[in-house]
Image (spheres, coloured by chain):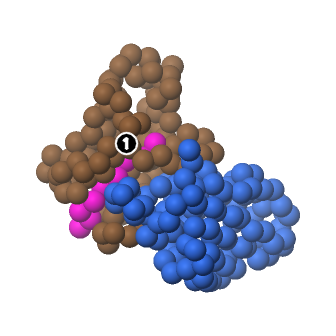
Chain colours: A blue, B brown
């Protein structure tokens, strides 16, 4: 059973379009992170959200954390080819689950010119 | 470069051989994690260390896998009698602030078992 499900799994869009990636958890974590990974590289942290209802913005990226702290979304405005990559949500500190990061299934984004 | 360093970056081996990967974390980080990732999927947790103590191991870590961090600095991940199903990217990460999900990952070691 996958604790963190992401949708969509794949997304191919044109430059300038907007998109939203969803992350849904069957459990509550102490915090939720979003990472981006490029081919041949390790994941790089984008943001951490902790509080239910929290919204964080990072340039053209907007992250929301659900009130119940079990779902999150990543919205990208005016996507650019440089946004191409694998987007991963990850939960940390699952109750009874120890101090580890549990990753979602991933969303592969491709932004074309 | 003071980031997380992993080597080798690529390893091709024949089934049945043993392989060892090394990870050098960010120097002041006490926690070190190992993950395994297959193409297009999210990384899967294998094990983690607090200094030299191995605190948790995933059920994914069969008895052919062993990890060590003898002096609380660098860590090694050894896979004995490799199988084709072991082919994956092995990622190491270190954690500066404990009890947060902010991990710093290395570039990974890609294993191909023929």
Horizontal side of A112 relative to B39 (left or right) equals right
User: Residue sitting at 81 percent across and 56 percent down?
Assistant: A12
Label 1 is found on which chain of the structure? Answer: B
Judge whether residue A16 is colored magenta.
no
- Give the x, y percent position of residue B61: 36, 35
Looking at the rendering, which quadrant does residue A84 occupy? bottom right
Q: Position of residue A2 (x, y in %)?
A: 57, 48
Q: Is residue B35 magenta?
A: yes
**Magenta-highlighted residues:** B27-36
Q: Quadrant of residue B20?
A: top left
Left/right placement of residue A38 relative to residue A83 reads left
Q: Badge 1: how crowded within 10 Å, few (<14), some, or many (20+)?
A: few
What main secondary structure does the magenta stretch of the protein show?
strand
The count of marks equals: 1
Residue B51 visible in rendering: yes
- Coordinates of residue A11 in the picture (x, y in percent): 78, 56
Task: Look at mark 1 in the image and give the residue it sits on.
Answer: B58
For the residue pair A35 and B44, the one nearer the viewer reads as B44
**x 41%, y 36%: residue:** B60
**For the view shown, which residue lies furthest in the left direction?**
B71
Q: Is residue B21 above or below residue A12?
A: above
Residue A39 visible somewhere in the drawing: no
| Image quadrant in which the N terminus of chain B is located | bottom left
Asked whether A90 or A76 is in front, the reply is A90
Task: Tell me the element at label 1.
Answer: loop
Which picture quadrant has residue B25? bottom left
- A113 versus B36 height, above or below: below
Please name the residue shown 57% across and 58% down the image: A26
Q: Position of residue B51 (x, y in %)?
A: 19, 57
Q: Residue at x 31, y 28 (%)?
A: B63
């Amino acid at each position: 059973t996958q604790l963190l499900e992401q949708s969509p799994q794949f997304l191919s869009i044109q430059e300038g379009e907007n998109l939203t990636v969803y992350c849904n958890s069957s459990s509550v974590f102490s915090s939720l992170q979003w990472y981006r990974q490029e081919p041949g590289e390790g994941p790089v942290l984008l943001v951490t959200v902790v509080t239910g209802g929290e919204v964080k913005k990072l340039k053209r990226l907007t992250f929301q954390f659900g009130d119940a702290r079990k779902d999150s979304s990543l919205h990208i405005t005016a996507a650019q080819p440089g946004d191409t990559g694998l987007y991963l949500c990850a939960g940390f500190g699952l109750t009874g689950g120890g101090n580890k990061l549990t990753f979602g299934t991933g969303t592969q984004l491709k932004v074309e010119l | 470069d003071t980031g997380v360093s992993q080597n080798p970056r690529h390893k091709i081996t024949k089934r049945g051989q043993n392989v060892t990967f090394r990870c050098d974390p960010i120097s002041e980080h006490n926690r070190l994690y190992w993950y395994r990732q297959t193409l297009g999927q999210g990384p899967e947790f294998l094990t983690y260390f607090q200094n030299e103590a191995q605190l948790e191991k995933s059920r994914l870590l069969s008895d052919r896998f062993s990890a060590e961090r003898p002096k609380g600095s660098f860590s090694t991940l050894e896979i004995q009698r490799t199988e084709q199903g072991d082919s994956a990217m092995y990622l190491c990460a270190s954690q500066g602030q404990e009890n947060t999900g902010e991990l710093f990952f290395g570039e990974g070691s890609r294993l191909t078992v023929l």
